[in-house]
Image (spheres, rainbow, N blue to C red):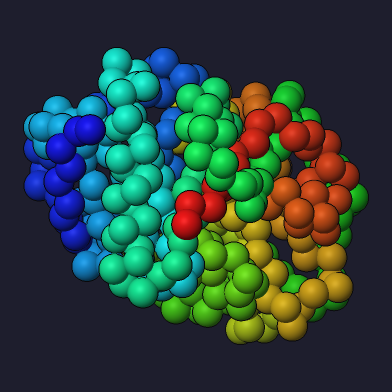
């Protein structure tokens, strides 16, 4: 079994770079990124409840796991093993260590992401008898067709404007928390998490749309363009108090119009596999499922 190193909080810059290199090698081999955006941000920006597990030499690790223990009862982890180090017990050791870290904080189990549901992750899960407890769908609109602006009108009294950094953070965090109260990741985003994304090179406030009635924020539609060939509906949220006013379709149409203006040929989004209302909105806009991430329960 490989030697494991555990560290909470922030990784040294050189170690963080080594983890990014490890993730890049796995992505090149598997065709899908093994670590999502938040764990990558937490390599150098994590708090004391973020635990990093490194297999082998921290300067060039064979494997890595990150465990989010902000709420041990909802502990989640993401794991990556270098293609050249697989089938040597590295993945098993990282899963066991992630579970041990969770139990040390009082949690009973840890939910582990498998992005793309790739064969190595399925094989490891099958060998341990791990159940799938959640699915995250990727849906794609390919090619992007600019929507008819009259097809999804705004409700009377509602206006849409771009996000203003330095002004809208607190209102957005509050509405996002209510809109995603049942979502274990999105609903827990803090102002610091938002500001970390504002510092990313892809951030564009013109593509971050806020729906308001007077000065009250009702919902938002956030787009992302990280590469020229693909745009993303990054987040779509509506305050529960504003449900039933067709804000979802209206914001979706305006986000697609913005992305069309940016010239991207394809748009993707991510949504929970059991979120039937959201899937109906996206399918009505032309999206179809294109990939799936799964979550396994370890414990």
As drawn, is 142 to the left or to the right of 59? right
- Image position, residue 291 (x, y; %): 66, 31
* Near-viewer residue (42 or 76): 76
From the viewer's perspective, is residue 80 above or below residue 180?
above
Q: Is residue 32 above or below residue 50?
A: above
Q: 91 or 78: nearer the eye?
A: 91
Front in this rendered view, residue 251 or 258 = 251
Can I make out residue 116 in this image? Answer: no
Percent position of residue 283, x then y: 84, 42
Q: Residue at x 47, y 57 (%)?
A: 299
Q: Residue at x 55, y 75 (%)?
A: 177
Expressed as whole percent of the image width and height from the top left, the position of residue 110 reads 45, 58
Report the number of numbered marks.
Answer: 0
Instruction: Choose top left, top right, bottom left or bottom right for residue 161.
Output: bottom right
Q: Quadrant of residue 84?
A: top left
Q: Quadrant of the N terminus?
A: top left
Judge from the rendering whether residue 31 lies leftward or rightward of residue 283; answer left or right.
left
Tell me if residue 122 can be seen. yes
Q: Is residue 169 above or below residue 121?
A: below
Residue at position x 67%, y 42% in the image: 137
Asked if 147 appears above or below 133 in the picture, the reply is above
Q: Quadrant of residue 118?
A: top right
Q: Is residue 36 left or right of residue 214?
A: left
Residue 28 x/y as whole percent: 40, 17
């Amino acid at each position: 079994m490989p030697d494991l190193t555990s560290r909470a909080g922030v990784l040294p810059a050189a170690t963080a770079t080594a983890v990014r290199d490890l993730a890049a090698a796995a992505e090149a081999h598997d065709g899908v990124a093994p670590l999502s955006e938040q764990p990558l941000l937490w390599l150098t920006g994590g708090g004391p409840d973020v635990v990093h597990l490194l297999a082998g030499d921290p300067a060039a690790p064979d494997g890595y796991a990150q465990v989010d223990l902000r709420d041990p009862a909802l502990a989640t982890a993401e794991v990556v093993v270098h293609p050249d180090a697989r089938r040597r017990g590295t993945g098993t050791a990282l899963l066991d260590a992630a579970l041990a870290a969770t139990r040390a904080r009082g949690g009973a189990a840890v939910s582990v992401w498998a992005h793309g549901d790739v064969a190595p992750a399925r094989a490891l899960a099958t060998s341990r008898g791990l159940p799938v407890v959640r699915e995250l769908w990727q849906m794609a609109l390919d090619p992007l067709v600019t929507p008819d602006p009259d097809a999804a009108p705004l409700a009377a009294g509602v206006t849409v404007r771009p996000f203003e950094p330095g002004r809208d953070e607190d209102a957005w965090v509050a509405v996002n928390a209510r809109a995603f109260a049942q979502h274990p990741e999105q609903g827990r985003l803090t102002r610091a998490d938002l500001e970390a994304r504002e510092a990313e090179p892809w951030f564009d406030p013109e593509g971050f749309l806020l729906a308001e009635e007077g000065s009250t924020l009702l919902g938002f539609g956030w787009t992302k363009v990280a590469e020229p060939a693909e745009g993303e509906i990054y987040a779509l949220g509506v305050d529960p108090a504003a449900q039933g006013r067709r804000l979802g379709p209206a914001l979706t149409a305006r986000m697609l119009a913005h992305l069309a203006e940016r010239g991207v040929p394809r748009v993707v989004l991510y949504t929970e596999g059991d979120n039937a209302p959201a899937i109906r909105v996206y399918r009505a806009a032309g999206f179809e499922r294109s990939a799936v991430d799964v979550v396994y329960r370890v414990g």
